Image (cartoon, helix red, strand yellow):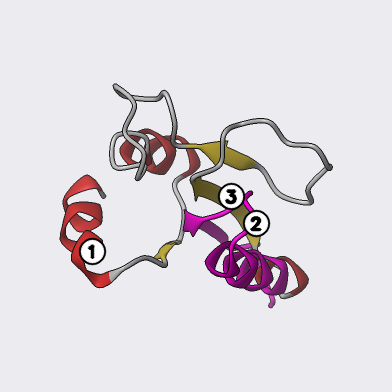
Amino acid sequence: MTGQRKTCLFVGDGGVATGFANMNHAYVDGMIRGGWETHFLAVNFNGDQEQPSPYPIYTTRGYGGGDQMGYARMPGLINKLRPDVVCVTTDPWHVPQYRRAA
């Protein structure tokens, strides 16, 4: 990439031992290698990070009344980070709520 570094807020299962989380971390790792500044709002992540990460990982739990999917936390992160893109990987029935949250 040329010019100013682009920023992404990535939202999806993460920081846990699931296939979906592994896929999402691979996406985020690829974005980092591609020069993106990436922040990960990780569904099912409890906030205890055992290993250092090359990108910030935010928990959805216990935030905004215990919203597990991150709907309540997403607007604040968007406002703070001002990402160029928000990438959400989830089951299709969650997409309308994420769109409303953004």
| Horizontal side, residue 30 vs residue 85: left or right | right
Q: Residue at x 16, y 60 (%)?
A: 96
Q: Which residues are magenta?
A: 1-30
Q: Nearer the viewer, mark 2 or mark 1?
A: 2
Residue 30, quarter of picture = bottom right
Q: In the image, what residue type sits under mark 3?
A: His
From the image, tell me which residue sits under label 2. Answer: 17
Q: In the image, what residue type sits under mark 1?
A: Val
From the image, tell me which residue sits under label 1. Answer: 95
From the image, tell me which residue sits under label 3. Answer: 39
Q: Is residue 100 above or below residue 71?
A: below
Residue 89, quarter of picture = bottom left
Q: Residue at x 45, y 35 (%)?
A: 80
Q: Looking at the image, is mark 1 or mark 3 earlier in the sequence?
A: 3
Q: Residue at x 25, y 71 (%)?
A: 92
Dot 1, crowdedness within 10 Å: few (<14), some or many (≥20)?
A: few
